[in-house]
Amino acid sequence: MPLRVRTGQELELMRHAGRVLALLNEELGRNVRPGISTAELDRIAREFIAGYEDCTPAFLDYDGFPAAICTSVNDEVVHGIPDVNRILKEGDIVKLDAGVLYRGWYSDAARTWAVGEISSEKRKLMEVTEQAFFEAMKVARDGAYLYDIGRAVEDYVKSFGYAPAREYTGHAIGSDLHEDPMVPNYKPIGRGMRLKAGMTLAIEPIINMGSPRVICEGDWITRTADGKASAHYENTILITEGAPEILTLAPGEVEHELH
């Protein structure tokens, strides 16, 4: 199925959902510290989103997910469930993944945060994962091929000895949180479909420090098979004829060079 091209009004609704989510990510980052529980971060997210008219948490009750945000710590890869008993400690890294639904249209973004002082190894993983997203942005534009995105991510992170978690991908997004096609963080065989201006995607490098293998734990949480850390960086983007428009960057975040 071809990617859908968004109309002007649809894009304005998605831009608003993206702005709210960008501000939420800033608020969550300000609250990440040793001693806070992941349940408290979820409470902050719910109250923050509720402060914006017609906005609701995109993840809450999505396929039965019980929280407004995913909180994945250290070797947890994705879909960590907030818990009052999960207390962040000095040296942890925590992945906070969230979405906002505004008048029928979605945004989706994730950040990895340091909890106090962290090791240089974890810091490097975070930096490389974030930069992998911006490497993908260099090829995510009108006329390019879908799998060019995954190639850019994989080539970049492999140069540091890291590996994409192959089971998890980015995706198209719009009036549904997850739309086809999926956007791998590696290059499958072939090139995939051509991208077209007006398409909206959630691009999300999910990068393991060691093995790409993951282990499922219950209905939601996954961990790296080797117990090493994993990082996650995601934004909702709009394909254009030039550099993509990133809908979920906050005003205070530094946008990397895309040209």
Image (tube, helix red, strand yellow):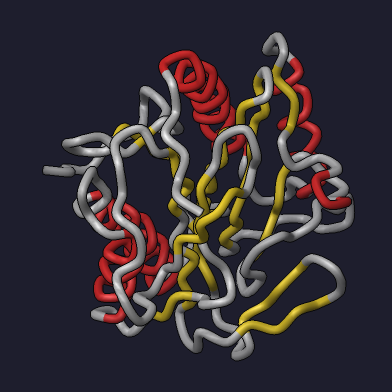
Residue appearing at x 45%, y 46% in the figure: 3
Residue 228 position in % (x across, y down): 55, 82
Residue 232 position in % (x across, y down): 50, 59
From the viewer's perspective, is 84 left or right of 259? right
From the viewer's perspective, is 48 left or right of 92? right
Residue appearing at x 81%, y 40% in the figure: 60
**Image quadrant assignment for residue 242:** top left
Residue 124 position in % (x across, y down): 35, 67
Q: Nearer the viewer, residue 180 or 203?
A: 180
Residue appearing at x 17%, y 43% in the figure: 258
Q: Give the residue furthest to the top.
A: 53
How many numbered marks, from 0 up?
A: 0
Q: Nearer the viewer, residue 198 or 162?
A: 198
Residue appearing at x 26%, y 66% in the figure: 152
Q: Nearer the viewer, residue 9 or 89?
A: 9
Q: Is residue 52 above or below residue 94?
A: above
Q: Is residue 230 above or below residue 210?
A: above
From the viewer's perspective, is 102 left or right of 187? right
Q: Is residue 235 visible to the viewer in this orientation of the structure?
A: no
Q: Give the residue furthest to the front.
A: 1
Q: Is residue 9 visible to the viewer in this orientation of the structure?
A: yes
Quarter of the picture holding the C terminus: top left
Residue 234 position in % (x across, y down): 47, 49
**Image quadrant assignment for residue 43:** top right
